[in-house]
Amino acid sequence: MANHKSAIKRIRTNQKKRMANRYYSKTMRNSVKKFRNLEDKTQAQEKLPQIVSLIDNLAKKGIIHKNKAANLKSKLMLKVNAL
């Protein structure tokens, strides 16, 4: 167990950040999953900018790797173009 005051605070802040990161990661995964199940091209084109923005923000914050973000966006755009 941590003995220093700063170490105890660091444990608390790390826990809060970890929970927030898990929430955003799960939200992104759920939205991508729902997007992949779409069959209507117009609806997919409307939702694509929102999902791309979400993925970009997570990559910018370091929650997901920038290459993973690029791969996700690429696959989603291929999906829209294939509809």
Image (cartoon, rainbow, N blue to C red):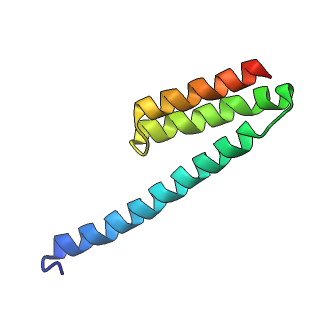
Q: Is residue 80 or residue 50 the one in the foreground?
A: 80
The x and y percentages for residue 76 are 65, 29
Q: Is residue 32 or residue 47 the one in the foreground?
A: 32
Is 25 positioned to the left or the right of 12 in the image? Answer: right
Extreme top residue here?
Answer: 81
State which quarter of the image contains the N terminus: bottom left
What residue is at 67 percent from the left and 29 percent from the top? 49
Above or below, 74 against 6 in this view is: above
What residue is at 53 percent from the left and 58 percent from the top? 23
Residue 74, located in which quarter of the rendered image? top right
Is 3 positioned to the left or the right of 73 in the image? Answer: left
The x and y percentages for residue 82 are 75, 20
Above or below, 83 against 6 in this view is: above
Is 5 positioned to the left or the right of 28 in the image? Answer: left
Q: Is residue 82 or residue 5 the one in the foreground?
A: 82
Residue 10, located in which quarter of the rendered image? bottom left
State which quarter of the image contains the C terminus: top right
The x and y percentages for residue 41 are 83, 26
Is 66 positioned to the left or the right of 6 in the image? Answer: right
Above or below, 65 against 75 in this view is: below
The x and y percentages for residue 22 are 48, 58
What residue is at 68 percent from the left and 44 percent from the top? 33
